[in-house]
Amino acid sequence: MEFEERLGALAAKVRNQRDAIQTEEATKNAFVMPFISTILGYDVFNPLEVVPEFTADVGVKRGEKIDYAIMRESEVQILIECKSSTGPLRIEHASQLFRYFAVTNARIAVLTNGEVYNFYTDLDAPNRMDDKPFLVLDLADIDETLIPELKKLTKDIFDLDSIINAAEELKYVGALKREIAAQFREPADEWVKFFTGRVYDGAFTQKVREQFTLLVSKATKQFLNEQVNDRLKTALGATSVPSVTMGDPAAIASQSIVEGDLDRDTEIETTLEELEGYQIVKAIACAEVKPQRVTSRDAKSYFAVLLDDNNRKPIARLWFNGKKQKYLGVFDDAKNETKIPIENLDDIYEHAELIRSTVRAFR
């Protein structure tokens, strides 16, 4: 598989298995070790490359351990500290990383819960780990602009100088993007006041603040809605696209648009929800085949996901045209379809193994 395919496959694995992983040790085995091996390319069973439970006594702290140390030419290059996938990451989790960073040759430290990977270096002071990461990889919402930088940390490429040189820009651009996304989700008073002052001449009273907090939130979501619809019009060659109900604006804005492989006629209307469902099925299927082999065709009643653009190789069907209930169509070895009721798109991940087994049978 290509690097992007392996990253997508691991992201699908995390989404599919997240609820079954309840401990830190399970997080390491199920998510972090595959990240080190399949994404970064290091042999987790070779102590010359990856040292688990790495120990380096620090001052009065004796016998503390870092979960993994990645070695190159007998020198520590990357330190990795893991926490359970059941909770979010906090800087308080990084206390051991701070100490070990100062007494080893490592220039990169990683704090992860198996789903989010925070990468740190020493931009603010030499040999002292920064408080804020320069790169944040979230497998639930992969920022494709970070992939080239992540590749620089892989075994085959490993270009430490290049990534350190780019780290400052990555740090601040990433932080700004996360802050903008946060403002789109829930605008702060300063954000509301700034935009209110651009369109409203009166005093910024408490009543005006409350009124414009709702208006700014509504306007930003509508703006992103229109941007997504414009992209869909361009991608699908359509003159109109049904209105999108916005969820997380940051996630919607970062979604890739499906390739122009949809068969359409004048009575078929492809919705954004069908495209999102297609991307989920494709990500799951890519654990078995290359992504270019997974295609789609829209029909009047359902949206079909196919292998090799072949109607005789159906991977799944999305029955999303009903007013109330949505269904995921899956197939057995005899190509008999079973329609499974789903409440939302995330439910598709619960049937990932059925989708993968269908792909394996055609492969």
Image (cartoon, rainbow, N blue to C red):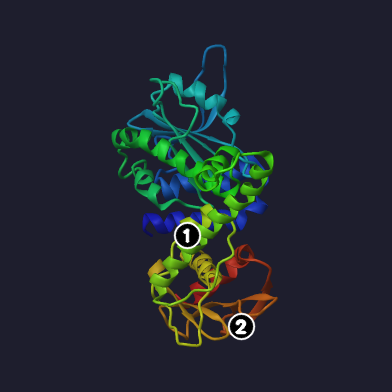
Residue 309 x, y percent position in the rendering = 41, 80
At 48% from the left and 63% from the top, the residue drawn is: 226
Q: Which residue is mark 1?
A: 255
Judging from the image, what secondary structure is the residue with disc 1 in?
A: loop
Q: Nearer the viewer, residue 290 or 74?
A: 290
Q: Which residue is mark 2?
A: 337
Splitting the image into 4 quarters, where does residue 50 fall?
Answer: top left
Q: Is residue 35 above or below residue 123?
A: below
**Number of marks present in the image shown:** 2
Q: Say left or right for 75 vs 29.
A: left
Residue type pointed to by label 2: Glu
At 51% from the left and 27% from the top, the residue drawn is: 97
Q: Is residue 158 above or below residue 97?
A: below
At 57% from the left and 23% from the top, the residue drawn is: 64
Residue 314 x, y percent position in the rendering = 51, 80
Q: Which mark is residue 20?
A: none
Marks 2 and 1, the one that precedes in the sequence: 1
Q: Nearer the viewer, residue 87 or 363?
A: 87
Q: Say left or right for 215 vs 289.
A: right
Q: Say left or right for 333 vs 144.
A: right
Judging from the image, what secondary structure is the residue with disc 2 in?
A: strand
Residue type pointed to by label 1: Gln
Residue 45 x, y percent position in the rendering = 46, 42
